[in-house]
Amino acid sequence: MTNENARYSSFVKTMIYRENLRHEMRDARKQKDWGALRDDATALLQSDPDDLDAQVAIGESYEKEGQIDLAVQAYERALPLEGHGSAAAASVAFKRLDILYTRAGRYDDSLRVCRLYTERFPDSYDAWNRLRRAAQNAGDGELALTAGIEADAVRSEREYVKERNRARGARLLELYEARLAELVEVAAALNDQL
């Protein structure tokens, strides 16, 4: 086996190993086996220290077991990894930290996390709305107002795009139906000639 083939074989084995761990994590989550979820996620992190989904899974497992301080630490470790995993996992880390910090009365930490959330997801209504609430809790009325305005703008833009796409779809359907009616008339005229 050549050196290049050996490297490729090693790479493939590593990828298969990681994918198997991801499947085991999904199974553990379905079975609500939080210890197994954490073990699988830890093994995945040993293979790939920048795996965001694994880091979030560790936070989730601690949170489900009521170990809130460890959950917060795990979610905090996930934030710098947000470019190394799914956007959904990054969003979960931001949301869970916001909730946990708010429950603990740590409003400044909640505000910090929500600011990061809006930086990472500037088109997210949820991110801006969470920043609005965090700013209110932290006593920053000006930021709360600004974040609320931004949340409304994001929601309005999303609704506008949705309505525009619906209208565009309706217009295309009208054009299609008109063209179909024309073709039916042409076919009927051809039938009459035969």
Image: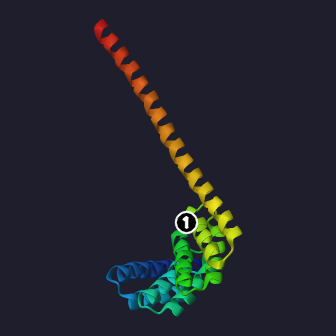
Amino acid type, mark 1: Asp
Q: Is residue 158 above or below residue 130?
A: above
Question: Where is residue 117 shown, x and y percent of the image?
Answer: 62, 71
Q: Nearer the viewer, residue 50 or 150?
A: 150
Helix, strand or loop at label 1? It is helix
Q: Is residue 152 above or below residue 176?
A: below
Question: Where is residue 124 shown, x and y percent of the image?
Answer: 58, 62
In the image, what residue occupies the spot 64% across and 68% down? Answer: 118
Would you call the spot at circle 1 few (<14 residues within 10 Å), some (14-19), or many (20 or more)? some
In the image, what residue occupies the spot 47% across and 33% down? Answer: 172
Question: Where is residue 188 shown, x and y percent of the image?
Answer: 31, 14
Q: Which residue is mark 1?
A: 126
Q: How are the residues colored?
A: rainbow
Q: Nearer the viewer, residue 82 or 160?
A: 160
Q: Quadrant of the C terminus?
A: top left
Horizontal arrangement in the rendering, residue 134 relative to residue 23 (left or right): right
Q: Nearer the viewer, residue 129 or 75?
A: 129
In the image, what residue occupies the spot 37% across and 15% down? Answer: 186
Question: Where is residue 97 shown, x and y percent of the image?
Answer: 55, 81
- Residue 6 at least partly seen: no
